[in-house]
Amino acid sequence: MSTPAIAAVDWGTSSFRLWLLDAAGTVLAERRSGDGMLTAGAEGFGVVLERHLEAAGASAALPVIVCGMAGARQGWIEAPYVTVPAGLDGILAGAVPVSGQSRDIRILPGLAQRKAAAPDVMRGEETQLAGIVPLFATGRHVICMPGTHSKWVEAADGVITGFQTWLTGELFSVLAKQSILRHSLGEVASPPSPENPAFIASCKQALGQGGDIGPQLFRIRAATLLQDQTPEVAAATLSGLLIGAEIASARRNLAPPEDKIILVASGPLGTLYAAALKLAGCSVMQADADEAVRTGLFEAATRMGWAG
Amino acid sequence: MSTPAIAAVDWGTSSFRLWLLDAAGTVLAERRSGDGMLTAGAEGFGVVLERHLEAAGASAALPVIVCGMAGARQGWIEAPYVTVPAGLDGILAGAVPVSGQSRDIRILPGLAQRKAAAPDVMRGEETQLAGIVPLFATGRHVICMPGTHSKWVEAADGVITGFQTWLTGELFSVLAKQSILRHSLGEVASPPSPENPAFIASCKQALGQGGDIGPQLFRIRAATLLQDQTPEVAAATLSGLLIGAEIASARRNLAPPEDKIILVASGPLGTLYAAALKLAGCSVMQADADEAVRTGLFEAATRMGWAG
């Protein structure tokens, strides 16, 4: 059995994932937890990281490559944004060392779009992009990266030329838990199946409205009062409306060539977006988001001479 | 000095307003408090009402006419919805008596739109509409009633033919307090001035997007990180985007004849919507919302023989 060459960490706002990889990039161990930036900021990033490294069986000298919110200003060590347009070489080469640690730890920078009228930032998704460069190495491409803050990225010949963010996941969460719609959705927590008729109907409806679902949201409340709508239908409807609106809005704003979309997503969310993009008439090439970020982290480690 | 003929109450989800009116509708006393349905549901609607009546100096026999959420299923006594299309006579005549009280108390019904694909409900706004009937007595009109849940109403020859709801006020609240944008807005609570350049710019931008502000919301966060945007500018931008999106969406959905809008609103929100509607190129006739609801309640009391 091979030995670990590096630890690769995707450190988000509310999630922490760590893999031990050998010199060929094979996964030897994995840890997932809720020790994101918010938790780690309180407990100490170094303490949290060492705890997970020990639990995964990492040696004391194993180097660590990190991406995500750990590199934010309010994170561990700020890894300043690389400005688009940017190739991914610049990102992978821009890792910032964390000083005062017993091992070599580097944090990858995020991407910033500094257009005055359309500022935007990402941290973590750029490493996923670095992991799927072959998919957009030539020609113009549009890449959809769904999540709490969905990113839609434009790339030309392997260079990230621009990106925009939709608050879809966060809108679902605040509307479902904090707004009047909470009375309709109740405790329904899991995403709907892509075959759910309410999801399909509401997604199609939103896809036909150019990104505007203004008058549709309160109807979820009214349907509970007037039409005995179940919480499951309410949740599937909200999900379909928000995802449909995001896709309609992104297509309107980005005009993907031939309506081809590279979808970078994992799990149920990936299944849901793939279904919604197909309802929109897009052709979808899907890459697994977990695999993409791991590949991107491994690429960065390789360039530092730690692996490969 | 004249004596009170009735007490008129607008009882919302989170607000309570009471006026003592003489037989000609003149205001003799006023009470405003946060004892809305949520508070009153816990303390008891009758207890809360009697406390305010006593403080206002009402006699023990003074009859009370009520509109708003007190008539909801989860309110005091359910006053079942009147279904549109509906003239306002039906609403004013449909008051439901509250039994077991020491005085005569009646609650006005709300309106329901029972179209399968576009269910909607209102409670309270129908009484404002009853108070401004002369403004839409002949011809087709579109009426904008901004608030937590903004209502856009279509009327033809004095009959309410349909309506739709935008969650604008609630979206502002949950985005400002619960989402990632809270880091940009901070504690800014008051609405912007309609002359605020950030409000005007973002409102114009949203007005040009047909109701879709998907990619604009996260830019508020990014502008804080990349452009040293102040919390005041962030709040004015969010306000302009949401109000502009509502107006663009409503115009797209309702096609107001000659772009004339009857705006029913009071205070700073009224000023803001009037400015935004003018930015949209609409001609605006504004009615005061407080006065409208009071007039509507007085009309209902008159039909019951309590006044007029």
Image (tube, coloured by chain):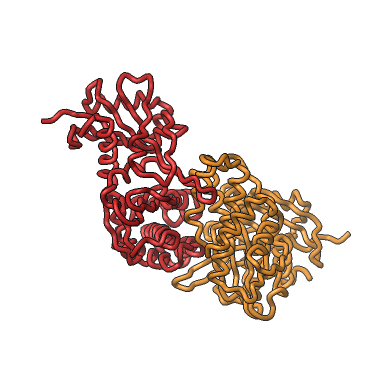
Chain colours: A red, B orange
The answer to which image quadrant residue B243 occupies is bottom right
Q: Quadrant of the C terminus of chain B?
A: bottom right
Q: Is residue B104 above or below residue A178?
A: below
Q: Nearer the viewer, residue A127 or A53?
A: A127
Image coordinates of residue B19 in percent, x first then y, are: 74, 57
The number of discs equals 0
Image coordinates of residue B111 in percent, x first then y, are: 57, 69
**Looking at this rendering, what residue extends furthest in the right direction?**
B1
Q: Quadrant of the N terminus of chain B?
A: bottom right
> Along the horizontal axis of the image, is A257 left or right of B291?
left
- Residue B18 appears in the rendering: yes
Q: Is residue B123 above or below residue A123?
A: below
Image coordinates of residue B249 in percent, x first then y, are: 54, 65
Residue at position x 75%, y 48% from top?
Answer: B55
Q: Is residue B207 above or below residue A91?
A: below
Image coordinates of residue B46 in percent, x first then y, are: 64, 53
> Along the horizontal axis of the image, is A284 left or right of B213?
left
Q: Nearer the viewer, residue A89 or B254?
A: A89
Residue at position x 44%, y 63% from top?
Answer: A252
Residue at position x 28%, y 49% from top?
Answer: A266
- Residue B63 appears in the rendering: no
The answer to which image quadrant residue B69 occupies is bottom right
The answer to which image quadrant residue A75 occupies is top left
